[in-house]
Image: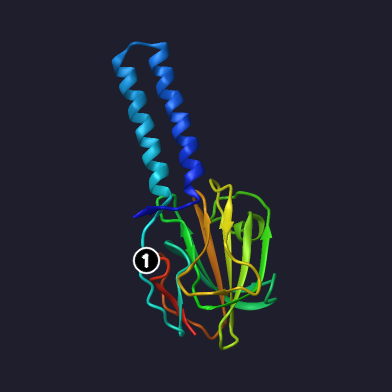
Amino acid sequence: MTIHREGYPSLLITTLALAALIGAAHYFTENVWIHNIAIGIGLFFFLVVLQFFRNPTVVIEKNENQILAPADGKVVVIEEVEEPEYFKGKRKQVSIFMSPINVHVNRNPITGKVKFFKYHPGLYLVAWHPKASTDNERTTVVLQHRSGKELLMRQIAGALARRICWYVKEEQIVEQGQEFGFIKFGSRVDLFLPLDAKIEVDLQQVTKAGKTVIATW
């Protein structure tokens, strides 16, 4: 188990803030109970932030015919929708909600080429809100499979998230299971798939990034 590189600044800020809290408790009172409570609170919040940025090793079993989960979390949407930004037509949508206790590393669901990328600043509605997909801070990434088929991924910031990180750019070749981004503190990832894709998950099913098969071409 390692700590994701996106966590280092947050852990430094958390450490400094908690050190100040503990120092203030010692400065303003000699009460041992207050000292212990301050230390306990400090350790609790440090461990919460530490677990959020954990980055476990994942062994990827690549398969050209499978679309793997881009995120750890729970499937909250499976439906046919109109995708207006890139495809401008009907697609199958599968959405994965990531709670603050999930690993927040995002992984490429397929091997392919990045055909389109766009970052959208926006609001911070709760990630399961119906308008979060169109109104929240988000990114849009379109990957093209070697067969020519395309899928769209959308990282969506949640109510607690204030920063989306991404590591891809247009025309880049990416590998299935490789990291493509990270979202801090609660969020969602949407997948928009061709209508002939066979969905392999159910609503409320728990997913693991780079492991769970979301669909097959």
Mark 1 lies on residue: 58
Name the foreground residue: 84 vs 114: 114
> In front here: 129 or 120?
120
Residue in the foreground of this view, choosing between 201 and 13: 13
Residue occupying image coordinates x 57% and y 81%: 194
Residue 107, horizontal then vertical, whole percent: 48, 66
**Mark 1 closeness class: few <14, some 14–19, many ≥20 residues within 10 Å:** few
Q: Position of residue 148 (x, y in %)?
A: 60, 87
> What residue sits 47% from the left and 38% below the top?
12
The residue sitting at the bottom extreme is 147
Give the number of marks.
1
The image shows residue 64, relative to residue 170, as above or below, that is below
Q: Dividing the picture into quarters, in which one does residue 74 lie?
A: bottom left
Q: As displayed, is residue 30 above or below residue 99?
A: above
Q: Does 120 sit left or right of 18 as displayed?
A: right
For the N terminus, which image quadrant? bottom left
User: Is residue 67 shown left or right of residue 29?
Assistant: right
Q: Residue at (46%, 85%) from the top-left corner?
A: 65
Residue 59 locus on image (x, y percent): 35, 70
Q: Tell me residue 76's x, y (percent).
A: 47, 63
The colour scheme applied to this rendered structure is rainbow
Foreground pick, 114 / 120: 114
Asked where in the image residue 129 lies, by quadrant, the reply is bottom right
* Residue type at numbered disc 1: Val
Helix, strand, or loop for circle 1? loop
